[in-house]
Amino acid sequence: MNTPSAPPKRVTKQDRTVGERIQALRKSKGFSQTALGSAVGVTFQQIQKYENGLNRVGAGRLSDIARVLEMPVSAFFDGDESDAGQEQAEVFDFLRVHGATDLLRAFNALEDDQVRREVLTIVRRVARFGQEQGT
């Protein structure tokens, strides 16, 4: 007797969002794919597949990843349509920019508040100059 098999589960937009957030949070914490994979019991290739949205992340595995990255599981999902949910989505968009996590890590390492303000002033001036130049 043949039993009908369920169609294979397809990766959804939400699965891709979870993967992108795993990647952003992993990088922000300074973990390699290999280190994160070892910590949760999978290969770096599996972490790559999660991050690229090729494989779905099961609930238990996502819980393990959240624990290692010291984040609540809810951080991997789109928030509601409130201002807080929109702000969280915007933060993840910023973290996807090449070099953003390196810049944040370096900025965070600055201990002097005055130096932080001066660095912020410089970055804002460079950004404004770039906009004025049309880049």
Image (tube, rainbow, N blue to C red):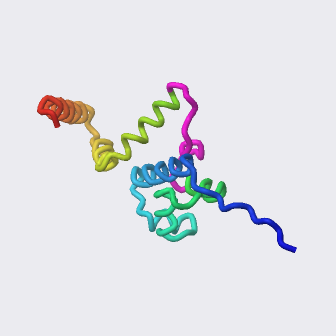
- Can you tell which quarter of the image residue 57 is in? bottom right
**Is residue 61 rendered to the left or right of residue 5?**
left
Number of numbered discs visible in the structure rendering: 0
Q: Position of residue 89 (x, y in %)?
A: 47, 37
Q: Nearer the viewer, residue 11 or 39?
A: 11
- Residue furthest top as drawn: 83
Residue at 54%, 47% (x, y): give it.
13
88 with respect to 7 (left or right): left
Query: Residue at horizontal 36%, vertical 40%?
Result: 94
Please tell me which residue is depicted at 42% across the width and 59% down the height of the picture.
31
Residue 132 point in image, percent of width and height: 14, 29
Up-down relation of residue 50 to residue 91 (above or below) = below
Which x, y percent locates residue 86?
48, 30
Q: Residue furthest right?
A: 1
Q: Closest to the observer: 59 or 28?
A: 59
The part of the image, by quadrant, that contains residue 61 is bottom right
What x and y, as percent, mark residue 99? 29, 49
Residue 48 lies in magenta, yes or no? no
Placement of 117 over or under 105, stated as above or below? above
The image quadrant where one finds the N terminus is: bottom right
* Residue found at x 28% / y 45%: 103
Instruction: Verify whether residue 79 appears in magenta.
Output: yes
Of residues 123 and 70, the one drawn nearer to the viewer in this rendering:
123
In the image, the segment drawn in magenta is 68-83
Q: For the C terminus, give its image quadrant.
A: top left
In front here: 109 or 68? 68
Q: Give the main secondary structure of the magenta stretch.
A: loop
